[in-house]
Amino acid sequence: MNFMKVAFLMALLIALFMGIGYLVGGQAGMMIAFIFAVVMNFGSYWFSDKLILKMYRTRPITENDNPRLYRVVRRVSTAANIPMPKVAIIPTRAANAFATGRNVQNATVAASEGLLEMLNEDELEGVMGHEVAHVVNRDMLIGTIAATFAGAIGMLASMAQWAAILGTGRSDERGGSAIGLLVTAIVAPLAAMVLQTAISRQREYKADAVGGSLTGKYLPLANALRKLHNAPVQMAMQGQAQMATANLMIANPLAGRGLANLFSTHPPYEERVRRLQELAQTAPYKGYA
């Protein structure tokens, strides 16, 4: 079901790109925007892991540096049947974790000092299961594809704005007006962002489920999400955690309320907890749950 939802959202994003592209610049304009977006996001996909690790000043560790974290990651990666990822620590009291890397051979999982202080070993294993699940599910690739089309739509919106200002564009040829192009310039990137973040939220649900199946720690992961939501130091990462990287975190460091949730990269933690509790009830081994 999660796969079908993601496929549907991706199809909507591609259809939005094609429709706006043809409206604004015809096939030529559509291809120009798409090529620019592909080039930019290909570079992001290939090098973003190094940039993100540097952005958060992560410290790579060995088993001797933090045996507890290293042991948990090794246990989860063995259960997932993937090579042992690199392990790093984020030097901040804000409790959070993320995974990055373009494939299982180049993956890194990172946990903050605050997370390690806050969680017991079962909860930590649940969180690391979630992060390893992102690697197994190739969420970096899916996120890059979504970002490519969202970025291309943003470029088309900019083209629409200039077309409206200069009085050019396909809408004029069809008897339209500059107002239509301006509306397109405003609405298109917002619609693309809504679809992109909706895809990200579905991937979070999937990572919770897959991580729970790898570790059996459905309820410890739910407990960890509660602790992260109620952590006394929630916003310490906000200066670093821009929108471009917020989707990597297990807990959204840029969480908002009300209408802002429409653009949130993460589902409400209450819904994640509820789903994890349901999965725990149907787990094949109740001792795991």
Image: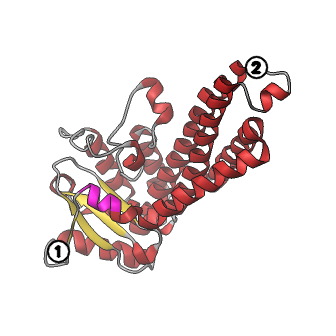
Residue 167: percent from left, percent from top: 71, 24
How far apart in space, not on screen, are marks 1 and 2 (Cα)? 65 Å
Q: Residue 132: which quarter of the image?
A: bottom left
231 to the left or right of 251? left
Q: Dividing the picture into quarters, in which one does residue 193 lie?
A: top right
Per the picture, the main secondary structure of the magenta-coloured stretch is: helix
Q: Amino acid at mark 1?
A: Pro
For label 2, the residue is 177
Residue 75 at x, y = what percent? Answer: 32, 75
Residue 219 picture location, percent across and down: 36, 53
Q: Among all residues in the image, which is located at the extreme right? A: 174
* Closer-to-camera residue (200/282): 200
Q: What residue span does the magenta drawing correspond to?
A: 51-56
Q: Secondary structure at mark 1?
A: helix
- Specify few, some or many for label 2: CA neighbours under 10 Å numbering under 14, 14-19, or 20 or more: some
Residue 287 can be seen, yes or no: no
Is residue 90 positioned above or below 156 on the image?
below
Q: Residue at point 27% right, 60% down?
A: 54
The image quarter in which residue 20 lies: top right
The disc label shown at residue 67, or none: 1
Q: Which residue is painted at 71% across and 47% down in the image?
A: 30
Residue at 43% across / 38% down in the picture?
268
Its colouring scheme is secondary structure
**In the displayed structure, would residue 214 be above or below residue 266?**
below
The numbered dot on residue 252 is none
